[in-house]
Image: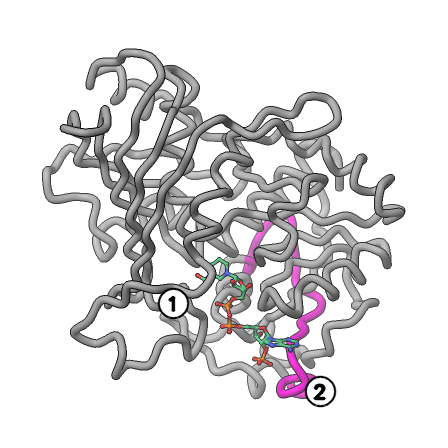
Amino acid sequence: MSRKYRVGILGATGTVGQRFVQLLENHPQFEITALAASDRSAGKPYAQACAWKLAGAMPNYVKEIVVEAIAPPLDCELVFSSLPTGVARETEEAFARAGFPVISNSSAYRMDEDVPLLIPEINAEHLALIEIQQQRRGFGKGFIITNPNCAVVSFAPPLAALDKRFGVESVFVTTLQAISGAGYPGVSSFDITDNVLPYIAGEEPKVETEAQKILGKFTGGAIEKANFTVSAQCFRVDVLDGHTASVRVKLRRPSTLEDVFAAMKTFPSLNLHSSPEHFIDVCDEPSRPQPRLDRDNGKGMTITVGRFFPDNIFDYRFVALSHNTVRGAAGAAILNAELLIDRKIL
Ligand SMILES: NC(=O)c1ccc[n+]([C@@H]2O[C@H](COP(=O)([O-])OP(=O)(O)OC[C@H]3O[C@@H](n4cnc5c(N)ncnc54)[C@H](OP(=O)(O)O)[C@@H]3O)[C@@H](O)[C@H]2O)c1
């Protein structure tokens, strides 16, 4: 096992920041040595700055770390970023320019053509963009890599499994997104209780574009995006954690339902510390997946799918579910960092 890398977290007091703190406790390859957040928190011990909202107590090892401002340098070798998009663009570049690898969870750089948008099981070869990015932007040793939008992560893996075998032509997706996806305090209880909100600001364009980059091919100098169209409607629902996607897909080549199941069941996981045993898990019960019952599958790192049927308009329909703050955020970024170690980029 490799040595432990010293890591900093930008946005450490937020919903995703807290998940980083929880998932990195006792991690064999990383130890937290720096925490940073807004002026509201900077200068205070983490225990005082952070209103801890996850189940279980705040881990002791972070309580006394004094939260700093989000400016380089920090006392660490790489940073995980869970900053709001507006702040992320300038800050993440500043860290990369100062020589830090930035493993970002925000949307600021996801679609930039020289920035990898990674799901390691699908497109680890996109890491080759790092060198191009460093040269183009004059970053020296620093760089930025990203993980996808938390709703995209639920349906991009089953699409990847289908695309590999049959080619995907078009996708119609409706997302049912959890409250924690809006951060803390997020949506008011008055608005979300007993309700479904048919609008999440800025979400549909991300859901309609990111999967094509993730499933794209690295062609030597750039990513050639996958050639399919996504039509999306995104809803906020009264669920705490776990984004569900209702998906209809048209394929380029004929397939049977058995072929579709086989494509899901045989899509391999990786052998990294945070990799789940099953990257994609297929439910047989007709009433699954459900967020409360299935979001913690594979410690929150498995994509759970089910309800596959031939569709009257498209070829197939199905339901996909993932944990938005684990596989959709902190867990995804940590897996990306483990991939960097595995590929000897760190
Ligand atoms: N929640 C999810 O499921 C999820 C999933 C995927 C991606 N994301 C992305 O992850 C990022 C963080 O989301 P979140 O849900 O964790 O949000 P959040 O709960 O609102 O937390 C935001 C964090 O950023 C800090 N911050 C806010 N404004 C700042 C500023 N002007 N300068 C410095 N720090 C600032 C906050 O610090 P203070 O506590 O000091 O205010 C806090 O630590 C966003 O880009 C979001 O789109 C979230």
Going 17% across and 43% down the picture, which residue do you hit?
288
105 is higher (above) or lower (below) than 130: below
Residue 10, picture quadrant: bottom right
Range of residues picked out in magenta = 24-44
Q: Seen in the image, is 260 located left or right of residue 225?
A: left
Dot 1: what SS? helix
- Return the x and y of residue 192 as percentages of the image width and height: 26, 74
**Hey, what amino acid is under mark 2?**
Gly
Q: Mark on residue 73?
A: none
Badge 2 crowding class, 10 Å Cα cut-off, few under 14, some 14 to 19, many 20 or more, is some
Residue wearing tag 1: 180
Q: Seen in the image, is 256 located left or right of residue 69?
A: left
Label 1 and label 2: CA atoms lie apart by 26 Å
Whether residue 89 appears in magenta in the rendering, the answer is no
Going 43% across and 19% down the picture, which residue do you hit?
164
- Return the x and y of residue 190 as percentages of the image width and height: 25, 83
208 is higher (above) or lower (below) than 58: above
**Hey, what amino acid is under mark 1?**
Ser
Residue wearing tag 2: 43
Dot 2: what SS? loop
Q: Can residue 117 be spotted in the picture? A: yes
